[in-house]
Amino acid sequence: MSGEFPDRAYAKTVLAVNFADFQRYFLEELIEIHRAHLAMLAEQQIVSADHARILLAALQGLDIRELRAAPFDGSCEDFFFHVEERLACSCDPDAAARLHTARSRNDIAITLYRMVIRREILDVVAGALTLRAALLGQAEKHRDSVMPAYTHTQPAQPTVLAHYLMASVEMLERDVTRLRAAYRTVNRCPMGACAITTTGFPIDRSRTAYLLGFEDVLVNSYGAIASVDYILETAGAVAAAMVNLGRLTQDLLLWGMQEFRFLQLPDGFVQGSSIMPQKRNPVALEHSRILASRAFAEAQAVMTSLHNTPFGDIVDSEDDLQPLVLTMFQDARRTLELVGASLEHATFDTARMRSRAAAQFLTATELADTLVREANLSFRAAHQLVAQAVQAHPEDQTASRIVDDLLQLAPGVAPRERLMAALDPQIFVERRTISGGPASAALTPELARARQAQAGLSEWLEAQRARLRAAHEELLQWKV
């Protein structure tokens, strides 16, 4: 058994893996933090101008490709020390050693995690908005496409396809709202917290935060290091989005079954069979469903990993956890992109959908409502009459048969033509003009509002990306 750190098993199972993960996920962010911290130290005169110039030149001279390809050989405990060693080799070692003044690996690590996570949040928001745009486009085309709405997985009432799609459009808007809230939580800078109690040097935390593109400083230094709610809130937002998307995808897969035949995906999203020449397998949606489930499970795993951990600096929230967080984002992005691309050019069999909406007596509610209006019956009395008419001839659910049976039960209760009209699925839809309903009068303003919201959400996304780009450019232009 080795008496020196690191033991070979520890180096193999922890240090080497974390070294590679850092190279893959966090290299550029580490260099940005070095540059921003150096700028602040120089401006605060904590390091001299001469040392700052030496350090800036050394940072500018780092070969990113070489750093990314460097093998873990055990000479450095982690990638942070590997970069520190490369700086010391490329400039005056005394100057290189001054860069770590008034900071710690603790605040560096939490800062670069937040930098990467905020970018990932924006990418997921972009995917959600792309999918939302595809749904809006289909809704615009199908505001008059009558179809059955389902409750308890059974046909319930007529609606229109746009009404169904707009429910998902609103759902995605809420998903983006949750992601925006998570972004605001994440986009606060821990730099200056140092190990956990700040420092005795006169640093300017706001300046470092500004140069790194953060909206603000994460004030309490203990919480800056110890808190993990920025991860939890983010994972929760992604989890909710993936559950929502998985439910939509499950409906779409059902609609593609031959028993439904409501939905047909473009040829590029279906796969044939190696033995059955007739098959059109909707594999894109199947992959989407499992990817959404994976991202949801990864979000759960992230939250479970943090449950009951101590409130302080602890490795549970660091090197071993962060790749799982990023895998969650990757699967979420893949899902959103795949469903959005599948739906953008998908086609719907509107004739079949309308035929299904006219069958199985889905307009019964409107027939009962008509009796309330025409005969001044209570809704319960009207409901009972309609139920008796439906049950009189269960083998014949045509409109004329139902109306005939109803008029036998209650002669003269209402004009026959009005009862017949009540059973028309198109009329059923047109009468639902209340806000949020399927009638064109209700859908048109909602579509307009959704388009306006889409523009606003897209503007927010571009504003955040522009802010990060501007901060990056300003940091690159900084001179001693």
Image (spheres, rainbow, N blue to C red):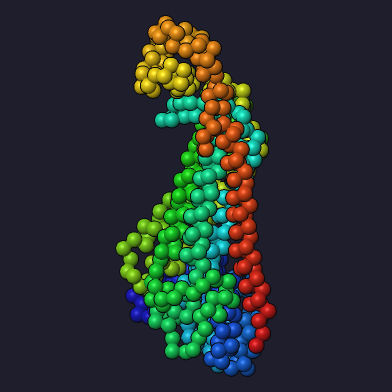
Picture coordinates of residue 336 (x, y %)? 56, 48
Pinpoint residue 127: horizontal percent, then vertical percent.
59, 51
Image quarter hosting the N terminus: bottom left
Q: Where is 313 relative to 352, above or below?
A: below
Residue 341 appears anywhere in the view: yes
Q: Position of residue 435 (x, y in %)?
A: 52, 38
Residue lying at 63% horizontally and 60% vertically, measured from the top left: 462
* Image quarter of residue 143: top right
Q: On the picture, is 474 further left or further right than 377?
A: right
430 vs 395, left or right, is right
For the C terminus, give its image quadrant: bottom right
Task: Please tell me which residue lies in front, 41 or 381.
Answer: 381
Horizontal and vertical percent for residue 91?
Answer: 62, 89
**Residue 76 appears in view:** no
Q: Is residue 91 left or right of residue 366?
A: right
Q: Looking at this view, is 325 or 311 the one in front?
A: 311
Write the residue at 59% across / 93% down.
48
Q: Nearer the viewer, residue 219 or 342?
A: 219
> Which residue is located at x 39 percent, y 82 percent?
197
**Residue drawn at (44%, 64%), measured in percent from left and top?**
230
